[in-house]
Image (cartoon, helix red, strand yellow):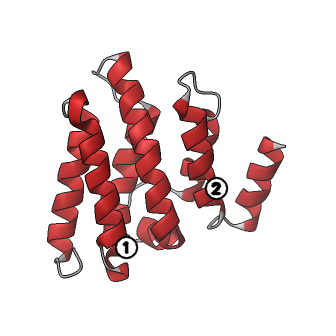
Amino acid sequence: MSRASEDTVTQVCNTLVAQLSHGKSEIRDVFAIGLKKVITEVDEQHGVVVLKALVGALHDGIQGIAGISDEDRSGVRVEALDVLNELLGRFGGLLVEAVRSGAGSVTDTALLSLLLNQLGGKEADTPKRAMLALASLSAHLSDELLQRLMTTLL
């Protein structure tokens, strides 16, 4: 992925995240692994491109996609949290830049609220993975949002 064009990176990300969200549940983990591989292998210069391609879809996957079974929704949520953790760990510092350049309405504030809501999740893996993603996000939060996170957790 280090020599791929921005369009290619975007296309690969869009395809993999669509399959993660709407593909066969039996191989959902394969698409999550593919996304994590893209995140780890892509050049730093493509970080904003990857964020723009993934943040909104991962947000939707965590929040809950309409039209799929509760079991599938749970599976998508867990995998999306895992991928989001990887994404924020690698490119979280570029999140504000990505939002300014068209990542949609998914801001650090929106991600913080979403992840905090997942801490009370019913599935065993949801709170754990939400906490990991919060840890990755916290390194890139403004002082105000970090204070909000600490106040909420404590």
Instruction: Name the residue tied to disc 2.
Output: 135
- What amino acid does circle 2 point to? Ala
- Residue 114 in sight: no
- Dot 1 alpha-carbon crowd within 10 angstroms: few under 14, some 14 to 19, many 20 or more: many
Mark sitting on residue 8: none
Spot occupied by residue 45 in the image (x, y as percentages of width and height): 34, 82
Element marked by disc 1: helix
Q: How far from the left and from the top, in percent, is residue 103?
A: 38, 61
Q: Is residue 38 visible?
A: yes
> Looking at numbered disc 1 in the image, what kind of residue is underneath it?
Gly
Say which residue appears at 44% left-offset and 70% top-offset.
Answer: 100
Which residue has dot 1 on it? 47
The image quarter containing residue 142 is bottom right
Image position of 56 with respect to 102: above or below: above
Determine whether the residue tagged by mark 2 lies in a helix, strand or loop.
helix
The residues tagged by marks 1 and 2 sit, at their Cα atoms, a distance apart of 19 Å
